[in-house]
Image: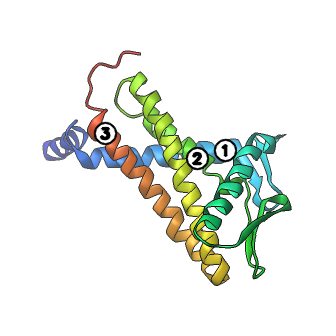
């Protein structure tokens, strides 16, 4: 019994990186569950409901429009021939394309990132600055993610599911993890938790 107690104390100690990773994963899962509890929606109709009652799609419209515009602009900058059609469909001259919906905006990932940093160790002032910078980074990573998916979609639509649903989705969360690691290494060690 004392050996088990010793192992538990070692796991819960401040200097245990495994414990910190477990805490990160738990925070990620809790933030994701809170998001799913609060927001429900249908990407195909741009409908997103707060608590299943109020349509809040208008709150996401700017992010939808800017994601479509910036992704299309980036693709055009590097030589793709994309155009934005009604309902934020990014279309190529060969007829391939995709509709940008609220799920493409990274607002959910931004929320998860903000929750993880808010509940991490560190000063509140540092957290506020880090979250603001992190949200910009997440937004830019998302534009690259959507542009990459669209670029592959132009030439091979069959790549959509693997890129969108697996590779770039989890790569996004890996980026959030490394941003959190940076936070833990550079800012969380400050003992002064003054506001």
Quarter of the figure with residue 121: top left
**Residue shown at 65%/48% (left/top)?**
36
Q: How many marks?
A: 3
Answer whether labels 2 and 1 touch (C-beta < 8 Å).
Answer: yes
Q: Nearer the viewer, mark 3 or mark 2?
A: 3
* As drawn, 31 above or below 146: above
Outermost residue toward the top in this view: 194
Rounded to the nearest angstrom, the CA distance separating label 1 from label 3 is 28 Å
* Residue that carries the numbered disc 1 in the rendered image: 37
**Residue shown at 43%/36% (left/top)?**
117
* As drawn, 59 above or below 142: above
Rounded to the nearest angstrom, the CA distance separating label 3 from label 2 is 23 Å
Q: Nearer the viewer, mark 1 or mark 3?
A: 3
* Residue that carries the numbered disc 2 in the rendered image: 33
Rounded to the nearest angstrom, the CA distance separating label 2 from label 1 is 6 Å
**Helix or strand or loop: what does disc 1 sit on?**
helix
**Helix or strand or loop: what does disc 3 sit on?**
helix
**Residue shown at 57%/76% (left/top)?**
162
Q: Where residue 184 is drawn, which disc sits there?
A: 3
Viewport quadrant of the C terminus: top left
Percent x, y of residue 13:
21, 37
Task: Classify 10 Å Cα crowding around label 1: few (below 14), some (14-19), many (20 and above).
Answer: few
Task: Classify 10 Å Cα crowding around label 3: few (below 14), some (14-19), many (20 and above).
Answer: some
């Amino acid at each position: 019994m004392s050996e088990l107690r010793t192992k538990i104390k070692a796991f819960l100690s401040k200097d245990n990186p495994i414990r910190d990773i477990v805490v990160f994963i738990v925070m990620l899962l809790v933030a994701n569950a809170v998001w799913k509890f609060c927001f429900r929606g249908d990407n195909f109709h741009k409908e997103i409901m707060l608590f299943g009652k109020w349509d809040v799609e208008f709150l996401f419209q700017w992010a939808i429009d800017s994601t479509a515009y910036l992704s299309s602009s980036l693709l055009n900058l590097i030589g793709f021939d994309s155009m934005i059609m009604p309902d934020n469909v990014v279309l190529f001259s060969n007829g391939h394309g995709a509709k940008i919906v609220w799920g493409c905006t990274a607002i959910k990932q931004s929320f998860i990132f903000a929750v993880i940093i808010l509940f991490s160790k560190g000063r509140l002032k540092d957290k506020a600055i880090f979250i603001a910078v992190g949200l910009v980074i997440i937004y830019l990573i998302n534009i690259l993610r959507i542009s990459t998916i669209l670029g592959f979609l132009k030439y091979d639509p069959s790549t959509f599911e693997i890129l969108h649903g697996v590779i770039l989705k989890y790569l996004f969360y890996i980026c959030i993890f490394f941003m959190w690691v940076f936070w833990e290494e550079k800012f969380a060690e400050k003992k002064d938790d003054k506001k």
